[in-house]
Amino acid sequence: MLPLLYPNPMTRDALLEDAQTAPIPELHRELFRFAEQFVRGSWNTNRSDLGRLRAAGLEDRDIVHWATLGSTQSWFTMSADGGGVPLDGNAITGPAVGRKREAYGATPERLGPPIAALESDRRDDEIAMVGLDETSDAYHETANWATKHYGFVPNLLRAVSLQPGFYRRHRLALELLEAPQSKSLEPRHHAMVRALVSHLNRSAYHEATARELLDRAGAEEGVFDQLRDDPLGMDWSPVDRAVLAFATKIGLNAYKVTEKDASSLREVGLDDEAYVDILNTVSIQTSLDRLANTLGVRPDSAPLLPQS
């Protein structure tokens, strides 16, 4: 898309070198800054970040639109990188918005307790840092589905109500995360991966859900906290360590995944279906965590799991 936005190759080169100094419109510069924070530290997003977008000319409807696009791109990019999908022939390669790809990595040592974005800067009655519009037919259809499915309407779905055209995507993502999508991945490992990824993203939104999933899957007491404090420790079984190491690599540096990572899963008895299931679980969970963090969505009062 860059050639369409910036026909001048010198502008594109300057953008790939450093988006903050490239000769591009100020609105574009703010969007690139917003996108970078979405990827590198969505948990740091606060009201002033959204205020900068509003000052640049965006309305809340636009902010929800770009946040959802960022969430979708996270899902697809992590799945493609982790799955070894080759670049298209006309793809532009280079530093992402002015930074080497290595700059987007993190380490387990940087994990901390889940953070509710803007907890100290939010009104008690606020669902998210953006406005809501719960009047559309698409919202009511989704709200009816959610009420039958979960027993309530999740705050995450309410927070994106300004862009009801994306509801199909959000519903699909939530449903795909409810259980393993293959017989090869045990429910316990699926629940562990979900909890680990929310720790990596320092997201509070899915904490109650992850805890309940671990409990239903028969995980040992304290696993949720152990996944935060010692995700790659020696106390895990060989299969646990292989699953958690692979999930961590995808969550932090999906583009570094190689055939060796697939082999490490096969060595402990997991097949390629489990590989794909873990990959998809990490990428979808990450996409929703980043979306909830960026919009400052308040956690639900109950786990986000189907009633039946």
Image (cartoon, rainbow, N blue to C red):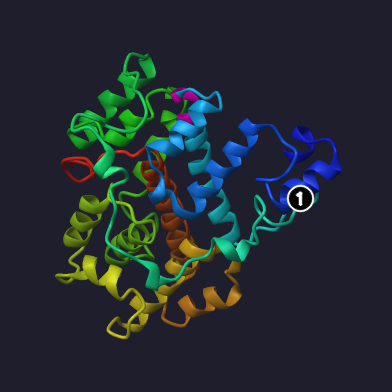
Considering depth in this image, is 7 or 79 the residue closer to the camera?
A: 7
Considering depth in this image, is 99 or 286 the residue closer to the camera?
A: 99
Give the vertical position of 71 relative to 240 (above or below).
above
Considering depth in this image, is 223 or 189 the residue closer to the camera?
A: 223
Residue found 22% across the figure and 67% down from its top: 225
Please indicate whether residue 215 sits to the left or right of residue 59 in the image.
left
Give the vertical position of 151 relative to 258 (above or below).
above
Residue numbers of the magenta segment: 60-64
Q: Element at badge 1?
A: loop
Please indicate whether residue 121 sits to the left or right of residue 83 in the image.
left
Q: Amino acid at mark 1?
A: Ile
Q: Position of residue 96 (x, y in %)?
A: 65, 53
Which quadrant of the view contains residue 171?
top left
Q: Residue furthest bottom?
A: 234
Which residue is tagged 1?
92
Residue found 35% across the figure and 49% down from its top: 177
Is residue 285 visible in the rendered image? The answer is yes
Give the vertical position of 160 relative to 231 (above or below).
above
